[in-house]
Image: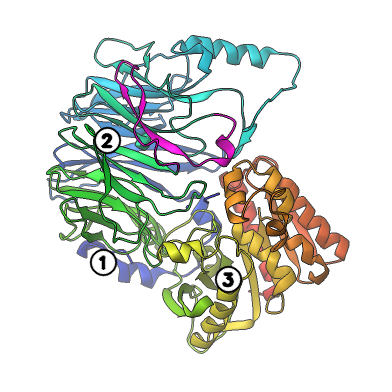
């Protein structure tokens, strides 16, 4: 159910005083919804050229477009990056050929998503594939002679992509609408199951237009990439291109209550599939081969059924199959694996104390070094002497920058920060604090001042509660729950990383399982008290609590168990009736781990912290929000919560999105969401 202070170069730093002096307003949801976004930093193999993606939004069509931009890092001129993708196209997923001469990308320009290539030095884009289906992802082989391609196909169609297309067309033409299922998943995240699996194919490059490919994962019955958020970081080519590795969970009856992803090795012709991590019944992910192909690096959890377990870094000797942990003393959960060219370091991001830094781990002794230490690193690439990364903070979305491979050279910003894009906006200053929470342990939180903060004044408070629950409200940017949108309305913001949050050690994360309503609640209560004691500008008499997913659950729990401090509540896609949630959600492993079993084996576990059992205590005005396409916490949870408030006579409203899932993603829907929430806060705490 996982829901998931930049160091600026001198030239950028010198521009900030002018921007600050021009600032005259707070940050708005319109700013957030329509501002440009930068992502996908991609280096040429020699590290001399950077390509990245820029997303823009058309307000009238309510749609976005993504283009690719290039910056030569060797020329020390002030020339801005230039667009390299064709004008008018929307493209994604850039990648350089191994020799750096060709730039590959995906585009739907032809009417379906296909693979294109263009000279890296500039020139016309050439379409490389004409498959019957959309290409969902790709990965070049190390020598650039082959490409792995991801498609969603019907298993019985095997490598015949046209067969899948015909089946989809026949289904669309069917007059009846009923669908018969004989096992779970029947739906996942926001999509109903139709029998297709995500599978990986391979095809040679340089032999004309590709219309067919070899099925690689045919003997591995599962989704690669995994659903709903997987990508080809779970797929790897061996250096000689003769073997591939992939992380796959078996698509069988037990899939909805299993986290058992395994690493499979398969010959590049699709034969010889073998499971090399069968002994581990927990999650194995992200395979990467060493340069000589003798070692397979990957990440592994230890506890089956627990999606928020620590991802340890592993090294397996391919010949013997023996594996060992690389950094057993590092109490962090690694996000991925990128190897340095010299084979001495493994780079990965991981959450740490309210930040999301980039680290490198010595393959010789497992020692860990910080490379990019502040803010939240969302993506990075390493080539030659260059490290490119995108980093966001509580004051800006992703800024793409470059530095040396060890991170010691000054960071050089390539794309603008939010402050540069919006020079008339004043940002809420933020500060991390800590206090003693549950079990006498240290708990961290953040406070964000309103944009128009003046010493000596008091400000109403938005008390934000993060989801997950194994997540964090740290020093990072969000396009859904962004404290600057509240600071921009004149509110102070308080956020607590309660027990169960990530980035504070695995024991801290584990503390919430089976304890959704007591340990984190104690942290929230003590954190709220500590924040008011430390920050005199917080007006404790004018505060509203808001949260989504687990944060929505906690708001619902607060409504019946800690409602005294709050003038209003906002619950977005939160669990209200926990027993029903255990049967209606799709990823059953989550509810079963968090509640100590199934609803029928351990009914007491589901009732222990069930908000529906405390409706008699509801009295604080509540805004309920839910999306129809939310299959993680189905819409009936929100409807039931609104019904409970209405039947109890509690002031309440229900904001319903027929076309959104667990998240509100469409730009104009996001604007409506924030305008509705802001109006609710203004009604109850002013500003």
Count the labels in the image. 3
Alpha-carbon span between mark 1 and mark 2:
51 Å
**Residue drawn at x 50%, y 55% as measured from the top left:** 32
Element type where label 3 sits in the image: helix
Residue at the disc numbered 3: 519
**Residue drawn at x 33%, y 55% as measured from the top left:** 391
Specify which label sits upstream in the sequence, 2 or 3. 2
Magenta segment includes 199? no
Locate the C terminus and report the quarter of the image it occupies: bottom right
User: Percent x, y for residue 566?
Assistant: 69, 75
User: In this picture, is 411 found above or below 221?
Assistant: below
**Number of the label disc, if any, that sits on residue 321:** 2
Q: Main secondary structure of the magenta part?
A: loop
**Number of the label disc, if any, that sits on residue 341:** none
Dot 2 crowding, Cα within 10 Å, few <14, some 14–19, many 20+: few
244 relative to 164 in the view: left or right: left
Specify which label sits upstream in the sequence, 1 or 2. 1
Element type where label 1 sits in the image: helix
Specify which label sits upstream in the sequence, 3 or 1. 1
Alpha-carbon span between mark 3 and mark 1:
42 Å
User: Percent x, y for residue 86?
Assistant: 34, 28
Tell me if label 2 and label 3 are in contact, CB under 8 Å. Answer: no
Residue range in magenta is 252-281
Magenta segment includes 254? yes
């Amino acid at each position: 159910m996982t829901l998931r202070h930049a160091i600026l170069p001198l030239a950028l730093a010198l521009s900030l005083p002018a921007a600050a002096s021009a600032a005259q307003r707070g940050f708005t949801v319109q700013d957030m919804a329509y501002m440009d976004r930068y992502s996908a930093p991609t280096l040429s193999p020699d590290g001399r050229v950077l390509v990245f993606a820029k997303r823009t939004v058309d307000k009238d069509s309510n749609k976005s477009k993504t283009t690719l931009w290039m910056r030569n890092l060797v020329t020390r001129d002030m020339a801005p990056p230039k667009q390299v993708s064709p004008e008018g196209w929307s493209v994604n997923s850039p990648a350089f050929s191994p020799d750096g001469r060709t730039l590959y990308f995906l585009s739907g320009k032809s009417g379906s998503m296909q693979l294109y290539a263009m000279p890296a030095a500039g020139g016309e884009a050439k379409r490389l594939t004409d498959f019957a289906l959309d290409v969902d992802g790709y990965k070049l082989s190390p020598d650039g002679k082959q490409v792995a391609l991801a498609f969603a196909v019907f298993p019985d169609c095997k490598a015949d992509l046209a067969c899948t297309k015909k089946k989809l067309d026949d289904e669309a033409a069917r007059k009846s609408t009923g669908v018969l299922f004989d096992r779970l998943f029947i739906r996942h995240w926001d999509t109903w199951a139709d029998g297709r699996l995500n599978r990986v194919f391979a095809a040679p490059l340089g032999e004309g237009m590709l219309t067919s490919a070899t099925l690689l994962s045919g003997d591995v019955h599962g989704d690669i990439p995994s659903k709903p958020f997987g990508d080809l970081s779970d797929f790897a080519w061996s250096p000689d291109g003769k073997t591939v590795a992939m992380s796959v969970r078996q698509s069988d009856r037990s899939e909805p209550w299993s986290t058992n992803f395994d690493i499979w090795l398969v010959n590049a012709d699709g034969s010889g599939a073998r499971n090399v991590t069968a002994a581990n019944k927990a999650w194995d992910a992200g395979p990467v081969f060493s340069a000589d192909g003798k070692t397979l690096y990957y990440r592994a959890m230890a506890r089956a059924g627990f999606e928020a377990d620590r991802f340890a870094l592993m090294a397996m000797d391919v010949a013997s199959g023996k594996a060992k942990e690389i950094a057993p003393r590092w109490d962090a959960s690694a996000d991925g694996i990128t190897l340095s060219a010299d084979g001495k370091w493994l780079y990965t991001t991981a959450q740490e104390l309210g930040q999301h830094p980039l680290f490198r781990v010595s393959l010789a002794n497992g020692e860990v070094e910080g490379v990019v230490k502040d803010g939240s690193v969302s993506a990075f690439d390493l080539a030659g002497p260059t490290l490119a990364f995108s980093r966001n903070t509580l004051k800006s979305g992703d800024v793409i920058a470059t530095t040396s491979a060890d991170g010691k050279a000054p960071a050089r910003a390539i794309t603008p920060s939010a402050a540069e894009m919006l020079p008339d906006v004043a940002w809420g200053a933020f500060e991390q604090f800590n206090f003693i929470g549950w079990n006498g342990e240290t708990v961290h939180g953040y406070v964000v001042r309103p944009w128009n903060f003046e010493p000596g004044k008091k400000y109403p408070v938005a008390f934000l509660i993060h989801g997950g629950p194994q997540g964090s409200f740290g020093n990072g940017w969000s396009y859904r729950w962004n404290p600057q949108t509240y600071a921009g309305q004149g509110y102070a913001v308080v956020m607590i990383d309660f027990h169960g949050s990530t980035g504070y050690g695995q024991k801290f994360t584990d503390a919430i399982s089976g304890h959704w309503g007591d340990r984190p609640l104690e942290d929230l209560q003590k954190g709220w008290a500590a924040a008011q004691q430390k920050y005199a500008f917080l007006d404790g008499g004018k505060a509203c609590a808001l949260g989504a997913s687990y944060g929505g659950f906690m708001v619902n729990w607060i409504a019946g168990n800690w409602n005294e401090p709050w003038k209003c509540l906002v619950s977005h896609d939160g669990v209200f009736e926990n027993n029903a949630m255990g049967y209606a959600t799709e990823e059953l492993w989550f509810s079963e781990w968090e509640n100590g079993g199934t609803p029928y084996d351990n009914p007491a576990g589901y009732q222990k912290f069930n908000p529906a059992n405390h409706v008699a205590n509801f009295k604080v005005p509540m805004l309920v929000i839910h999306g129809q396409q939310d299959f993680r916490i189905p819409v009936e949870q929100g409807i039931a919560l609104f019904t409970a408030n209405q039947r109890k006579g509690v002031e309440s409203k229900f904001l319903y999105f027929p076309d959104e899932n667990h998240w509100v993603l469409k730009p104009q829907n996001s604007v409506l969401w924030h305008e509705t929430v802001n109006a609710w806060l203004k009604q109850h705490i002013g500003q």
